[in-house]
């Protein structure tokens, strides 16, 4: 069995025999469903009001009133729960003193990093797949444009990958899982706040650079149905950079 595949199987087995994935997955799905319910109820109330005012059927844009708000809200949910999902990846290896065995095994550091990242990414994608029941169910009762829904899910997939890579990096620098979770959350929060700093600087070179470094603007484009190459490059390069940094941290531990 290839080393990466063996690590993925080991990590997935560890996730599903512990309560973490069930608690995080349950909170994620309940939050997604609850937010979807709130936005649908709000949209229905607006439709009733418009129907009464116009005296006829009201035209309601579900993409703007439901899905755009839903996807925009989920970035904050991911900011809170994904650090919990990644905090154990490498920190637990250090705490249980299995990190040394991992370093002396006939396996490259890059395979360790890739295997652990793919395993947690598969868990996240699995949770996302379950949320597709919301638009599929809504499609039975109403019509809407599927393209912004697809780009919204693309945004969640890319954003989640970036968040998980940051979490893996944070888990590589400590053996304390709580410290790893808070470090990951702090790094992501700083990236979020860069959007506010960039808007304060306005349309200046510094403001544009700082805004580009924040995940907020890139995610907003995808939620609005705008697929731009620079946004895709941002998430892919950001994820690769965080994995590279995690690789360097783990590799440096080999020589200590």
Image (tube, helix red, strand yellow):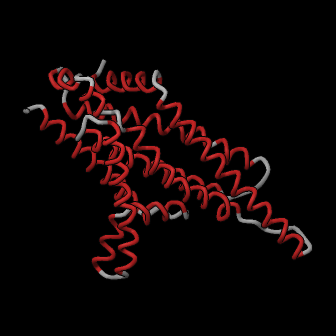
Identify the image quadrant of the C terminus.
top left
Which residue extends farthest left? 255
Q: Is residue 82 left or right of residue 138?
A: left
Which residue extends farthest top? 1
| Front residue of this view, candidates 40 and 114 | 40
**Residue 212, position in %: x, y?**
34, 67
**Residue 230, position in %: x, y?**
37, 63
Q: Is residue 130 left or right of residue 171?
A: right
**Within the image, what quadrant is residue 167 found in?**
top left
**Residue 6, position in %: x, y?**
32, 21
Q: Which residue is depicted at the point 46% across and 34% down?
A: 123
- Number of residue marks: 0
| Front residue of this view, candidates 11 and 147 | 11
Q: Which residue is depicted at the point 32% across and 64% down?
A: 213
Q: Is residue 133 left or right of residue 212?
A: right
Q: Which residue is depicted at the point 48% across and 32% down?
A: 21
**Residue 153, position in %: x, y?**
53, 50
């Amino acid at each position: 069995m290839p080393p990466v595949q063996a690590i993925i199987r080991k990590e997935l087995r560890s996730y599903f025999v512990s309560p973490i994935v069930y608690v995080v997955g349950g909170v994620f799905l309940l939050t997604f469903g609850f937010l979807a319910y709130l936005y649908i109820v709000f949209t229905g109330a607006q439709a009733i009001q418009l129907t009464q005012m116009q005296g006829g059927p009201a035209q309601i844009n579900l993409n703007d009133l439901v899905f755009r708000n839903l996807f925009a809200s989920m970035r904050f949910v991911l900011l809170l729960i994904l650090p919990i999902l990644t905090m154990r990846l490498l920190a637990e290896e250090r705490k249980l003193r299995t990190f040394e065995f991992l370093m002396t095994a006939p396996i490259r550091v890059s395979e360790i990093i890739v295997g652990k990242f793919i395993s947690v990414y598969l868990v996240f994608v699995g949770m996302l797949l379950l949320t597709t029941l919301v638009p599929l169910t809504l499609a039975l009762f109403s019509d809407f444009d599927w393209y912004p829904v697809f780009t919204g899910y693309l945004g969640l997939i890319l954003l989640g990958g970036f968040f998980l890579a940051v979490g893996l990096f944070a888990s590589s620098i400590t053996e304390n899982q709580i410290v790893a979770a808070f470090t990951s959350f702090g790094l992501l929060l700083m990236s979020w706040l860069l959007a506010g700093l960039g808007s304060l600087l306005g349309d200046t070179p510094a403001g544009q650079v700082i805004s580009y470094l924040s995940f907020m603007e890139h995610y907003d484009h995808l939620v609005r149905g705008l697929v731009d190459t620079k946004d895709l490059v941002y998430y892919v390069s950001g994820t690769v950079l965080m994995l590279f940094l995690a690789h360097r941290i783990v590799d440096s531990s080999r020589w200590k």
